């Protein structure tokens, strides 16, 4: 990212990001952060929060970002189809996504619409590419159901070892790829000196950006 040197008082010299004055660069910055969430396990964007609507009001939880595609404006993560998250999206596909990258001093908020993939080609391909120890998570009783005692929910035999494919494949019936189609991205950069906010909305296939007051 290109930068101009920016003098702060006499003592401190800071790099001023070029995106402070360029909406196109802001859009690229937002997508770069999003994409890092799918490709870099150490990125804070790897574990965004996803909010849904339920009969009890809004619900929010952490998920693990698996895939981000700028061209189709979509992101993906995996979930248990029996859990509150998927059930809430079946009732109302609207979802909000939040992530904060502290080193980049940037918050992203996404407005999205969910498409749920169960037992389709995408779900099968994703399942086949999933590590057996992660597949194991789909062998538990329904997530959120009473456990009666402290428990992982895993079959005892699989608590401490990787399942074989034939053991973990029983979980596929509960496996859901959640695809969130991104309709709007709100980007907020809160630096001590310079602050900016911008929104990008997908209208008739084109992203339209606008600066906002932070
Ligand atoms: C670091 C982290 C990553 C997580 N990743 C996922 C995920 O990718 N998919 C998922 O369904 N739950 C994930 N969870 C668990 C959810 O936060 C949540 O507990 C679970 O989805 C049940 O929530 P629900 O009752 O709203 O369905 C993750 C939790 C943590 C702490």
Image (tube, rainbow, N blue to C red):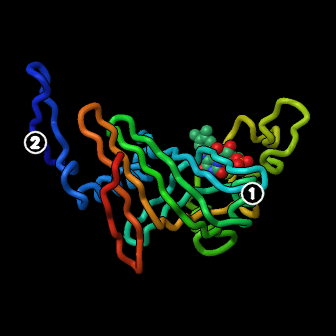
Identify the residue position indicated by label 2 in the image: 4
User: Residue at the location (29% across, 35% down)?
Assistant: 191
Q: Residue furthest bottom?
A: 204
Say whether residue 133 is left or right of residue 207.
right
When asked about the image quadrant of residue 212, the answer is: bottom left
Furthest residue toward top: 11
**Image position, residue 46 (x, y; %):** 47, 46
Q: Is residue 137 left or right of residue 184?
A: right
Please report the residue visible at 14 percent of the width from the left and 47 percent of the height from the top.
2
Residue occupied by mark 1: 171
Badge 2 marks a residue whose secondary structure is strand
The answer to whether residue 211 is left or right of residue 178 is left
Residue situated in front as seen by the camera: 10 or 178: 10
Q: Is residue 3 above or below residue 9?
A: below
Taking depth in this image into account, of 172 and 16 the one nearest to the observer is: 16
Q: Are marks 1 and 2 in contact (CB under 8 Å)?
A: no
């Amino acid at each position: 990212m290109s930068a101009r040197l920016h003098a702060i008082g006499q003592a401190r010299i800071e790099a001023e990001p070029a995106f402070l004055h360029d909406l196109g660069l802001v859009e690229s910055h937002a997508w770069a952060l999003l994409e890092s969430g799918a490709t870099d396990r150490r990125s804070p964007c790897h574990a965004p929060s996803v909010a849904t609507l339920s009969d009890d009001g809004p619900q929010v939880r952490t998920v693990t970002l698996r895939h981000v595609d700028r061209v189709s404006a979509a992101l993906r993560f995996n979930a248990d189809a029996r859990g509150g998250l998927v059930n809430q999206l079946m009732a109302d596909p609207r979802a909000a996504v939040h992530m904060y990258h502290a080193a980049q001093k940037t918050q992203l908020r996404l407005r999205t619409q969910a498409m749920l993939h169960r037992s389709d080609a995408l779900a099968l391909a994703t399942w086949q590419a999933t590590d057996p120890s992660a597949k194991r998570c789909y062998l538990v009783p329904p997530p959120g159901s009473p456990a009666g005692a402290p428990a992982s929910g895993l079959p005892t035999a699989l608590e401490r070892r990787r399942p074989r494919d034939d053991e973990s494949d029983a979980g596929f019936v509960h496996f859901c790829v959640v695809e969130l189609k991104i309709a709007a991205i709100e980007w907020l950069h809160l630096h001590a000196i310079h602050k900016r906010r911008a929104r990008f909305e997908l209208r008739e296939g084109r992203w339209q950006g606008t600066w906002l007051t932070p």
